[in-house]
Image (cartoon, rainbow, N blue to C red):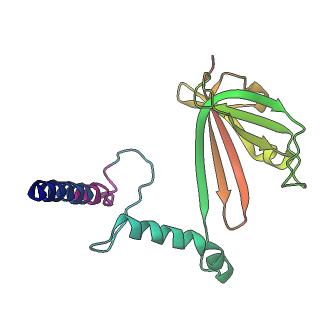
Amino acid sequence: MQQKILTIIFILLLLVIGGEVFYFFSNTYKPVLSPQANSTNQPQVTIFQQPNATAADVDKQVLITFANIKEFIKKGVLNSSVIKNVYQGYITKVGQTNAQLANTPDYYPKFQLSLKKQMNDTDEPFGFLFDDREMQSLKVEKTVDGKTQMLNFQDLKVGDLVTVKETFDLITENTSGYVITLLQTP
């Protein structure tokens, strides 16, 4: 009887160890091998990693970089650091607002834009607020027959499918611009 129990425990132990080995090898970091792998004009990132480096090592390096970015800016060694975000969704709300945000008493947004991935989503929409300064740098456009046409913010309607490109400069800590592209109207 004890022999059977020991055999069962041994088999379970082998299964657990086998699962851990499989998990380790299936979750190891796979770097981009070639910047030519993607034929689009999108910028490519090639990460050169040390031999035997794990995904956790690469993640730690990224965290260290973001944690020290203020120090790099202070020292003057960081000349440019820009984050570009691209959001896409259907407009659920667009227009003027008198919203006042509690944590930013000096910010007075005048216009709002809310997006959902799909119109019938039950999730809360993702919202943008724009003050007068941001409205001056805001561009609204659509592409027709390969040509870009400029639009006004007022041309956007609930149900339109859009992308919102946001550019944020980490050095000036300022959003330097928004471009809203109308992709499809209902």
Asked if residue 181 shows in the view, the reply is: yes
Question: x and y percent of residue 49 in the render?
Answer: 34, 70
In the displayed structure image, the side of residue 113 where residue 184 appears, left or right: left
How many numbered callouts?
0
Residue at far bottom of view: 75
31 falls in the magenta region: yes
Please identify the quarter of the rendering in which residue 71 is found.
bottom right
Q: Is residue 89 left or right of residue 47?
A: right
Q: Which region is colored magenta?
A: 21-37
Q: Residue at x 41, y 59 (%)?
A: 45
Front position in the image: 153 or 125: 125
Residue for point 65% across, 52% down? 167
Magenta-drawn stretch, dominant element (helix, strand or loop): loop
Depth check, front residue: 15 or 109: 15
Locate the C terminus and report the quarter of the image it occupies. Answer: top right
Residue 142, how many percent across, how many down?
62, 30
> Residue extending furthest top?
186
Please tell me whether residue 143 belongs to the stretch shown in magenta: no
Q: Name the residue located 37 percent from the left edge and 62 percent from the top edge.
A: 46
